[in-house]
Amino acid sequence: MTEKQPVTVNGRQYRWPSDPVVVVCIDGSEPAYMDEAIAAGRMPWLAQMRAEGFDAIADCVVPSFTNPNNLSIVTGAPPSVHGIAGNFFLDPDTGEEVMMNDPKFLRCGTILAAFSDAGAKVVVVTAKDKLRRQLGHRMKGVCFSSEKADEATMDENGIDNVVTLTGMPVPSVYSAELSEFVFAAGTKIMARDRPEIMYLSTTDYVQHKHAPGSAAANEFYAMMDGYWSQLDAMGCTIVLTADHGMNAKHDGSTGAVNVVYLQELLDTWFGAGGTRVILPITDPYVVHHGALGSYATIYLNDPLLATIIPAQLSGVDGILEVLDNKTACARFELPQDRVGDLVVLGAQNMTLGTHPDRHDLSGLTEPLRSHGGSTEQRVPLICNRKVKEPAGTHRLRNFDAFDLALNLAVTAVV
């Protein structure tokens, strides 16, 4: 049989898989979650894989949010290439604040689409529907979300009767079960159809609410461990990574939210209308974080504020760094036209907001945990295979996941 040719995507060449490849993005998986669950004896399969396969820490994309990182993983490239610089941004063409979840915002193709064009069976299952259209852009195959699994059709999603297939009802969008549905569907489809490439992406509902080592977190990671073991038993090459980490963003003694309300502060200093603060964490699912993260951009209506604001904000407790557009985009590989004039990073235990009146925190039933800045950049990068060459010869990124799975992993644990 003729060997299938490698597929080139965004300047990287990927070999055709000899075994089914499953890349998993565990939303919000701060490395400590796995460490604590393994220490508690709740993840026996992962403990073995970390010892026998490949186990490393990588850097995610900043801003450390869901959309930029998922798109980086499936394109094998940073946001400067694919164009998705946040969940939410100020559209320079309209001046309106919009969700960046439409495929029209993508500036390059995906590994998933390229392999499907080459004839591979490709399957994508994501927890929230906000990602589905971008992940499945120009891809032939199966692509659906847990959130709307009961609405999946052959014409739109490449699959139907998903609820019957999994034996699970469609879960609440604010639940651990929304992520479990991803794995339940993935294992059933792998057993039935044996696709060449599968991408599974979860939600960080649990990580926003529960710290590493807590009973709820350990239970959640034990659940995932069981499904990964099933996929491993089917002969899959599995790579695990995350879109971002997670940190406590509250006062340890009172549980009060730690936040700097940037728009309120800037309006007090310079008057209303001089600046516009955009929070790229914003999306339709804000109950578990109140649209508070540790990354913000500022658009300036008065260019004279470009040097004044960084100097003043640098003296505010909880502000880690203030960068101009050019510096931030060069450091974090972002598209300059989709980032504000200034980028503000919060400290490890601090969030950034706009104005108290614009954040509904009533849904925060536990002390706030969130993400977005450089302090949530460290994520796991794990493979159930050894690799053919040291992957640590360059800075490891979460968007090296498909390179690891398709180019560097050997076909069996040695």
Image (spheres, grey):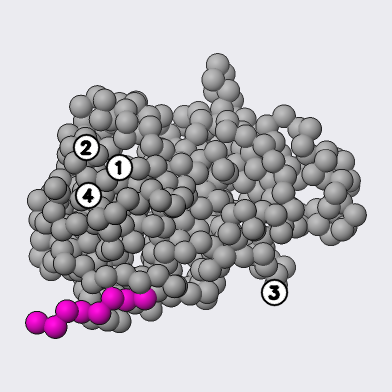
| Residue at mark 3 to residue at mark 2: CA–CA distance | 51 Å
- What element does badge 4 sit on? loop
**CB of mark 4 within 8 Å of CB of mark 1?**
no
* Residue 7 colored in magenta in the image: yes
| Residue at mark 4 to residue at mark 2: CA–CA distance | 10 Å
The residue lying at 25 percent from left, 30 percent from top is: 38
Q: Nearer the viewer, mark 4 or mark 3?
A: 4
Q: Disc 2 marks which amino acid?
A: Ala
Where is mark 4, residue-wise? 386
Q: How many badges with numbers are in the image?
A: 4
Badge 4 or badge 1: first in the primary sequence? 1
Q: Nearer the viewer, mark 4 or mark 1?
A: 4
Tell me if 264 is positioned left or right of 46 in this view: right
Badge 4 or badge 2: first in the primary sequence? 2
Tell me if 148 is positioned left or right of 355 in this view: left
Where is mark 1, residue-wise? 55
Badge 4 or badge 3: first in the primary sequence? 3
